Amino acid sequence: MKIHEYQAKELFRAFQVPILQGFVARSPQEAQDAFDKLGGSLAVIKAQVHAGGRGKGSFIEVPNQRGVQLVRSGQDAANAAKNMIGNRLVTIQTGPAGSPVNQVFLEQGCEIARELYAAVVLDRAAKLPLLMVSSEGGVEIEKVAEETPEKILREHFDPAHGLMPFQVRKLCKKLNISGSAAKS
């Protein structure tokens, strides 16, 4: 099953995982309204496709538009959405044909102290879910996987029980996560 970022964040919210506020938009006007609802002076607009590498990706129809962009006003959000929605985003994972963008996700802007990468995939050989995490962030995770695969930590878990506390402690230790961050 593939889900968009905004759908994953809805699941996080349902399980009380702390996340930034965000809204999905399917038109430039909805993007402008979403920026206004966020109430700040900075937001991030992200094309919603089932592929990584959106920040470095570009659109076939608007080559100078990236799939992730900082916006500082409702008008900036509307302009970016106009360049994204209805166009095809080409990333390292889509191939040259790209993927169509039908919606964007606007999220509150914030200061980034540290970026981490996390993904859950099905390991078909082990017949178990596999949590993959890295301290290298997610911007160029394919490059990390190719050049320094040891920086991607992997942990299988039983779907009936979820990650066990000892597994979480082990990963937190390897990622140098401590204190309240490790407990949340």
Image (cartoon, helix red, strand yellow):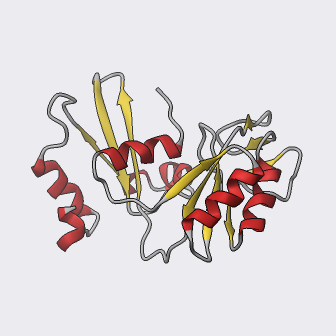
Q: Is residue 22 above or below residue 15?
A: below
Residue name at image x 76 percent, y 67 percent: 76
The reply, left or right, for residue 63 in relation to residue 89 is right
Q: Is residue 16 above or below residue 128?
A: below
Q: Position of residue 158 (x, y in %)?
A: 18, 31
Q: Position of residue 160 (x, y in %)?
A: 17, 28
Q: Position of residue 78 (x, y in %)?
A: 77, 59
Residue 12 visible to an observer of this rendering: yes
Instruction: Check the image and name the residue furthest to the right.
Output: 61
The reply, left or right, for residue 63 in relation to residue 8 is right
Q: Position of residue 58 (x, y in %)?
A: 78, 51
Residue name at image x 79 percent, y 37 percent: 96
Residue name at image x 72 percent, y 62 percent: 77
Quadrant in which residue 136 is drawn: bottom left
Quadrant of the rendering where the C terminus is positioned? bottom left
Residue 173 visible to an observer of this rendering: no
Residue name at image x 22 percent, y 30 percent: 159
The reply, left or right, for residue 175 in relation to residue 106 is left
The reply, left or right, for residue 42 in relation to residue 127 is right
In front here: 105 or 61?
A: 105
